[in-house]
Image (cartoon, rainbow, N blue to C red):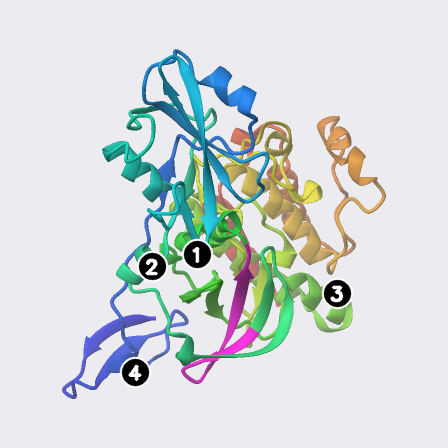
Amino acid sequence: MTIVTPTKDPNWYKARHVDCREGLIPANYIQKRSEVKLHAMPWFHGKITRDEAEQLLQPREDGLFLVRESTNFPGDYTLCVCYKNKVEHYRVIYKENKLTIDEEEYFENLSRLVEHYQKDADGLCTRLKLSVPKKGGPEFSVDSQEFEKAGWTIKLDDLKLGEVLGKGEFGDVVLGCFRGQKVAVKVLKDNSKAAQTFLAEASVMTSLSHRNLVQLLGVVFNWPSIYIVTEYMSKGSLVDYLRSRGRLHVTKKDQINFAADACAGMEYLESRQVVHRDLAARNVLISDENVAKVCDFGLAREKSFNLEGGKFPIKWTAPEALRHSKFSNKSDMWSFGILLWEIYSFGRVPYPRIPLADVVKHVEKGYRMEAPEGCPSDIYDIMKQAWDLEPDNRPTFADVLKRLEQIRAITD
C-alpha cells in the first residue's frame, strides 16, 4: 500500500494498493515505517566446543573474545574471554526473555550484551576488546525495539486469532483478523535463538514490497509469544493448488501466470540482492485473484550471510549450495527451474524415480529431469538453462521474466 496524497479532510488519505487499485483509507490506519536493520555478530561462532573456542582464541591477548552456544546448557550461550594467558568462560543465561551473565544486567539480545561489555568490564575479568570473527561470514541479531522504532509493531488488542492454518518452521500459522482484514499469523513460543531467527525473518520482510511477494503487515510482541502478521492468501500453497485441481481445472494460462508471477517476485529479490534459499511450490501462495506470491523468507538473508548445519530441501537446492553452502541468486535460479517443473507436472515431487540420497550424485553426473507431459518446449529450455552445473551460466531472473512475459502474451 502506497500513500498517494492527503485529502482535504485530514481524517482520510488517498492510497494505492500493490495491485494498482486506489481508494481512501482512514488517517489512523497510517503509520510511518522504515526498514528494520540487522546487527552483524562477527564474534558469534554457534555450536563449537569449549576446546575449539580455546584453540580459536590465539594469541591470548587480554580482551580477545568470542561467543558460542552453550554445550552444557542448551538454549544458553557462553562468552569466552582471554585474560592473563587463560580463557574465562562465562555462561550467558536466557531468563524471562532476556540474556544475562550476572542476573543484574539484562539484555534483549547478544549484540546488546556484547556492546555493554565492550564499554565496561562490569564484573568480567576484563573489558571485551577484540573479537575472533567467524569464518564464512557473520550471523545477525535484531531486537523488538528496532521494530517499534521503525513503525512495524501491532497492538495485540488490534489482532483477533482464529483457526490453525498449518505448522510453520517455528510454530503454528493461524488465521487472524486485523482491522477487519483477514491475515495470516505466524506464532512463536520458543527460546531466544528461535526468536532471533524469527525476528531476522521479519526484518528482511520490512525492506521488501512487491505484488508478487507476501506482504508483512506487522509484528506483535506479547512475551513469551511473538506474532508475525502477513497478508492472507486464501487459496493456499501453489503445490496444493496444483495437486487438488489438476489438469481438468488448471489451464495453460494459469500455469504461465503462476510461473511469471513467481519469477517477478524473485526478480525483485534479485534486484535487492536478497537470496531466498528455499524457493519451491510449497513456498508460493495463491491469492483470491489467482495471483502467485513468493513467501517464507525463513532462510532469506543478504548475500553475505552464511548458513551452516541447516536442513536443506535437497531436491530443490543447487549442487554448489548443498556441497559448499554457496547460496546466491544463481542457486535460487536452479530452484526456480525445479519450481517450473512442479508447475508443469501439476505438483509432482521432483526426481520421482531417484532416491533422495542419490539425487545430487545423479545431477552432478549430468542427469536432468525430462519435460513434464504437455510442457511447452520453450519452458523446458528455461528449466535446462536453470539447471546448468556452472552457476554463472544460469540466466538471471530479469532475463527469464522477459521470456516468460513473451510466452504469457501468446498463451490462450
Q: Residue at x 60, y 57 (%)?
A: 283
Residue furthest to the left: 8
Secondary structure of residue under mark 2:
helix
Q: CA distance from mark 2 to mark 1?
A: 9 Å
Q: CA distance from mark 4 to mark 2?
A: 23 Å
Q: Earlier in the sequence, mark 4 or mark 3?
A: 4
Q: Main secondary structure of the magenta part?
A: strand
Secondary structure of residue under mark 3:
helix
Secondary structure of residue under mark 1:
helix
| Start-end of magenta stretch | 175-190
Q: Which residue is mark 1?
A: 202
Q: Residues within 10 Å of mark 4 (few under 14, many from 20)?
A: some
Q: Determine which of the numbered discs, if any, sits on residue 147 in the image.
A: 2
Q: CA distance from mark 4 to mark 1?
A: 25 Å
Say what amino acid the circle numbered 3 marks: Arg
Asked whether disc 3 touches disc 1, contact meaning CB atoms under 8 Å apart, the reply is: no
Q: Is residue 298 left or right of residue 165?
A: left
Q: Nearer the viewer, mark 4 or mark 3?
A: 4
